[in-house]
């Protein structure tokens, strides 16, 4: 790559209004505003859904604090520093995944955790970032749209960790990671004929894939096709969450006034199904507002991606923001009964969730990409 | 930098195209979501509002019917009978404590019932009905029925209760179900057990819990604000548990249990060709029906503390010295390792002495057996012959040979908590006792005394392996699994490696000697061989009792009885084409020929369909 003309980006001391201050901290003000708004809305609805449990709200606030700190730290690191280490990062994550398969602790029947002395660690979380980074890194130096050969290698980068994670078994995470890798390929300009070929291939190999699934994974797919199959489990969740959202109407029942959720009809009401509580209490208007913030974040992220100056950061930020959208869509779609019940939390709103830190890390990366641009000309 | 040319402007344009495409996709999906919201919150608002405010939809789990258990001839061993239970729906009861104390005035409810009920309340959903009392009698039902209007959320429900029509018969094999306890709650799928009260606790009921339980169904019912059912909206039928067809022949089982006639002991009969367990007797047994709805404390502690230990599964977990029943195996070890020939005779003066050791190891026959060959040694159960043989073989060879018959390790039967017995070796003694192996211990190992311990199941299985010339077909009680009336799949565990046969003649010689035990005039079990229409091969055994300490507080007469030797007998028949192999052990009944052998004969006759002699 030809070296680009260099200009020192604004740093500490560039006190030219609040936006530039935020810029000096390498934060993107519009994104930050959206994320903070979401977090505040999340804390408010958690207070209601938990039955005014301040301990849970404070716990969530502390988790958010950690996640925002991670975002802030990552935003300070220029991407070209990280870029060099991408293959190492991916290699380590891959080794850890193998480690989990070999030595992983069995938690809830699935091997996802790796015990490293002081704390337990989920390598699949690391993969959520490592896969899009590695694919972006690999394609960055190749002519785009990628040739069939490069495409095959990129596909391998995605498939190996995805298969390992699916074997843990954690199908949900595996599919989301696969999506993040596929987004990189799509954004890189993979020819539509390859896309069509992939779709054909996937549908052709579906029976084989079906055969490899665990029983409970098969059950999930079956429940997706027919939710009434498991009315005592996830089917019950869907019925109750539809009642909660539907009874909210246009204006909602008001904060702290939800009946479905407070009468304990709605399971998982503080975690995966918190969106239903929001819908019940704030109604159609409230949900439109919430979805508006999510959409704003996604659009801002896509804009940042188009403004990125090299292929690596462009593909990476684009893939990360689209993955964020997928999380949001899968969760809300599931709560509204559009999609199967998979354990995907609503970003920044659902209580707990180990994935919050990973999510904010990806926003840190996106912000770094935007704030460390070298201005060519104005 | 690679040689391929990158067109940055074109790539950037391509990316922007794709990003725009992604944006369109995002917005389209957003529209889908909003359309769904419009449907839920605006168009169907009234509908959902009604559901949420006035009527509630509840899902009531419908427990699956537990699979039945049959014996090999289709005799029902475990079934489900309807019984009336008092059930409470926590969601509909405002003051639980008051309701329970009011109910106690009408129906007998123990503190344990209440404790168990509260435990279940925590585990199940608020609209699930939870049983407070099982097995209400007619009077209790009537008393509650007239005051029913005073108890919203309390109902009488007909539920299936497990029943064992044969009572104590084969209770140790079948096992029983009981109420689910906290430990079990952690291990089961809560959703699948949401309507289930019972879970297999022991025996087949426990081992095949997954097959027997089935899959829960549900009813979606609409209730009004008072919790009364308005209508049933939907129902998905539960999948009943699988019926199990056991290999047990309840006829043989019954004969054996009757023959025990109040004595303690165990008997296991196996079809050596398939490993199917024909009879699995542990005496005394217990009535499994007592455990189903909760046994009362008095009866339970009586069972627990009884000197006869009726809850102890002797066939599976009882470990006894095999005594002389081990001799055919030791003899075979000698022949197969070429350490001895069939014709070689050992002189038996009635005792044996190791060189340099003044201790006299006595034969059971004081005068001695004189010159003794292998056949005679087995037929008359000569101890000196086997002392000498054991000394020749050494403990290492004996251990390795016996291990091939599954001595000292679980047989792998489909029951939980099987004991592995004990097959001593040098390594074992050093590890467990921290002592070297002494030559004298080799001698007594040769006659089945000393450290060696076997379970009756192990002994029967080893006999089956001997009967089939070393073929391993591990014992199992489950013969077939079926949903309808007919047995379907056979379930066989993988066999362990067969005992290598050096010379078939050696095996035949041992089997012939065992036939002589029963048929020859000098045979220790000749009494049972009379008028047998098929050749029986057998071996008696007498095991010394060490278990009971002298200072334990028993009635003197009891102590004396309980210190007597255990009577043992192993056999298979017909000898040349074995269809049944068994081991019988009668505690404190003296010599093998007196109690165990006649019992074995009765079982063989019953199974092979021959009239009693």
Image (tube, coloured by chain):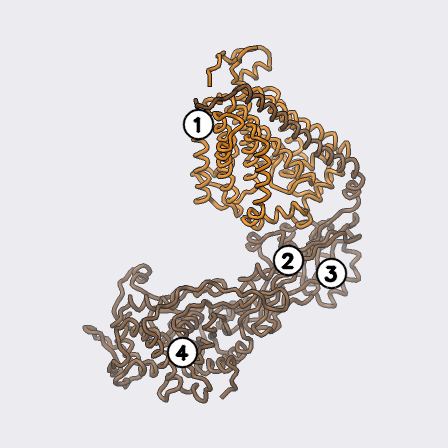
Q: How much space separates mark 4 and mark 1, taking CA atoms?
A: 79 Å
Rendered position, B384 above or below A277: below
Say if residue B586 shows up in the picture: no
Position of residue B246 in the picture relative to residue B134 (left or right): left
Q: Which residue is mark 4?
A: B564
Which of pointers 2 and 4 lies earlier in the amino acid sequence?
Answer: 2
Element at label 1: helix
Q: How much space separates mark 2 and mark 4, taking CA atoms?
A: 47 Å
Assess disc 4: are there few (<14), some (14-19) or many (≥20) residues with their C-alpha within 10 Å of its C-alpha. some
Q: Which residue is mark 1?
A: A85
Rendered position, B484 above or below A82: below
Q: Circles 3 and 1: CB distance less than 8 Å?
A: no
Which of pointers 3 and 4 lies earlier in the amino acid sequence?
Answer: 3
- Observer-side mark, 2 or 4, equals 2
Q: Which residue is mark 3?
A: B156
Instruction: State the image quarter where residue A355 is shown.
Output: top right
Q: How much space separates mark 3 and mark 4, taking CA atoms?
A: 54 Å
Task: Provide residue B36's location: percent of width, then percent of height.
Answer: 73, 36
Element at label 2: loop
Q: How much space separates mark 3 and mark 1, taking CA atoms?
A: 69 Å
The chain displayed orange equals: A
Chain letter behind tag 3: B
Instruction: State the image quarter where residue B353 is shown.
Output: bottom left
Residue nearer the viewer, B11 or B531? B11
């Amino acid at each position: 790559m030809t070296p680009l003309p260099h200009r020192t980006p604004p740093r500490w001391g560039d006190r030219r209004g609040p936006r530039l201050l935020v810029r000096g901290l390498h934060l993107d003000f519009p994104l930050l505003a959206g994320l903070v708004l979401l977090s505040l809305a999340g804390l408010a609805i958690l207070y209601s859904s938990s039955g005014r449990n301040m301990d849970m709200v404070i716990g969530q606030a502390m988790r958010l604090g950690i996640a925002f700190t991670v975002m802030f730290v990552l935003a300070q690191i220029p991407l070209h520093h990280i870029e060099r280490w991408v293959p190492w990062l991916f290699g380590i994550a891959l080794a850890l995944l193998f480690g989990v398969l070999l030595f992983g602790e069995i938690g809830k029947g699935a091997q996802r955790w790796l015990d490293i002395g002081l704390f337990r660690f989920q390598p699949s979380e690391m993969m959520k970032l490592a896969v899009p980074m590695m694919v972006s890194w690999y394609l960055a130096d190749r002519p785009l749209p990628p040739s069939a050969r490069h495409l095959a290698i990129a596909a391998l980068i995605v498939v190996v960790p995805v298969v390992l994670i699916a074997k843990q078994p954690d199908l949900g995470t595996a599919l989301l990671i696969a999506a993040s890798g596929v987004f990189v390929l799509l954004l890189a300009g993979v020819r539509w004929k390859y896309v069509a070929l992939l779709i054909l291939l996937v549908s052709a190999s579906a029976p084989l894939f079906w055969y490899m699934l665990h029983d409970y994974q098969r059950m999930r797919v079956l429940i997706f096709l027919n939710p009434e199959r498991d009315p005592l489990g996830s089917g019950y969740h869907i019925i109750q969450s539809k009642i909660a959202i539907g009874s909210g109407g246009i204006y909602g029942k008001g904060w702290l006034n939800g009946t479905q959720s407070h009468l304990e009809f709605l399971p998982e009401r503080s975690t995966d199904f918190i969106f239903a509580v929001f819908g019940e209490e704030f109604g159609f208007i409230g949900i439109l507002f919430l979805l508006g913030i999510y959409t704003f974040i996604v659009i801002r992220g896509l804009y940042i991606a188009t403004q990125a100056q090299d292929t690596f950061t462009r593909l990476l930020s684009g893939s990360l923001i689209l993955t964020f959208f997928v999380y949001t869509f899968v969760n809300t779609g599931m709560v509204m009964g559009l999609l199967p019940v998979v354990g995907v939390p609503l970003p920044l709103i659902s209580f707990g969730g180990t994935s919050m830190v990973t999510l904010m890390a990806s926003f840190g990366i996106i912000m770094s990409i935007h704030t460390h641009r070298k201005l060519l000309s104005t | 930098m690679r040689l391929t040319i990158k067109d940055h402007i074109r790539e950037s344009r391509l990316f922007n195209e794709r990003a725009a495409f992604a944006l369109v996709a995002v917005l389209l999906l957003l529209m889908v979501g909003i359309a769904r919201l419009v449907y839920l919150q605006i168009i169907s608002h009234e509908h959902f509002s009604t559901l949420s405010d006035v009527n509630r939809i509840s899902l009531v789990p419908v427990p699956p019917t537990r699979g039945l258990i049959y014996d090999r001839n289709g005799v029902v061993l475990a079934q489900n009978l309807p019984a009336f239970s008092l059930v409470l729906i926590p969601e509909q009861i405002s003051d639980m404590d008051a309701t329970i104390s009011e109910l106690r005035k009408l129906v007998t409810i123990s503190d344990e019932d209440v404790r168990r009920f509260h435990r279940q309340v925590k585990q199940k959903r608020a609209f699930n009905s939870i049983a407070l009392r099982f097995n209400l009698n007619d009077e209790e039902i009537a008393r509650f029925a007239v005051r029913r209007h005073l108890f919203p959320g309390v109902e009488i429900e007909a539920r299936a209760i497990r029943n064992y029509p044969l009572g104590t018969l084969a209770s140790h094999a079948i096992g029983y179900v009981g109420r689910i306890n906290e430990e079990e709650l952690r291990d089961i799928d809560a959703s699948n057990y949401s309507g289930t009260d019972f879970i297999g606790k022991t025996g087949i009921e426990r081992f095949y819990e997954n097959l027997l339980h089935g899959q829960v169904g549900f009813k979606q019912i609409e209730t009004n604000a008072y919790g009364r059912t308005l209508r049933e909206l939907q129902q998905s039928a539960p999948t009943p548990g699988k019926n199990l067809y056991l290999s047990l022949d309840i006829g043989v089982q019954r004969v054996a249990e009757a023959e025990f006639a109040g004595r303690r002991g165990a008997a296991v009969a196996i079809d050596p060709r398939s490993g199917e367990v024909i009879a699995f007797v542990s005496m005394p047994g217990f009535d499994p029906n007592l455990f189903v709805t909760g046994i009362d404390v008095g009866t339970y502690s009586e069972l627990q503390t009884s000197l006869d230990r009726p809850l102890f599964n002797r066939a599976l977990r009882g470990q006894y010295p095999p005594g002389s029943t081990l001799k055919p195996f030791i003899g075979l070890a000698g022949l197969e390792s070429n350490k001895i020939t069939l014709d070689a005779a050992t002189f038996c003066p009635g005792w044996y002495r190791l060189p340099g050791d003044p201790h006299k190891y006595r034969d059971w026959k004081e005068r001695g057996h004189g010159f003794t060959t292998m056949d005679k040694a087995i037929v008359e159960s000569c101890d000196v012959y086997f002392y000498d043989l054991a000394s020749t073989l050494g403990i290492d060879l004996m251990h390795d040979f016996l291990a091939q018959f599954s001595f000292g390790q679980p047989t792998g039967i489909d029951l939980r908590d099987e004991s592995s017995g004990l097959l001593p070796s040098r390594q074992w003694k050093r590890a467990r006792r921290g002592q070297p192996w002494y030559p004298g211990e080799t001698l007594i190992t040769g006659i089945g005394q000393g450290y060696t311990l076997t379970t009756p199941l192990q002994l029967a299985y080893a006999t089956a392996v001997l009967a089939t010339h070393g073929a391993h077909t591990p014992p199992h009680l489950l013969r077939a699994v079926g949903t309808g009336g007919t047995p379907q799949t056979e379930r066989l565990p993988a066999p362990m490696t067969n005992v290598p046969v050096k010379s078939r003649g050696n095996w035949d010689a041992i089997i012939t000697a065992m036939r002589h035990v029963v048929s020859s005039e000098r045979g220790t079990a000749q009494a049972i061989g009379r008028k047998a229409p098929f050749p029986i091969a057998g071996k008696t055994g007498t095991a010394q009792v060490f278990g009971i300490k002298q200072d334990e507080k028993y009635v003197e007469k009891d102590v004396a009885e309980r210190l007597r030797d255990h009577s043992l007998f192993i056999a298979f028949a017909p000898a040349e084409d074995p269809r049944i192999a068994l081991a019988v052990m009668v505690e404190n009944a003296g010599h093998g020929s007196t109690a165990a052998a006649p019992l074995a004969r009765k079982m063989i006759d019953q199974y092979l369909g021959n009239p009693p002699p």
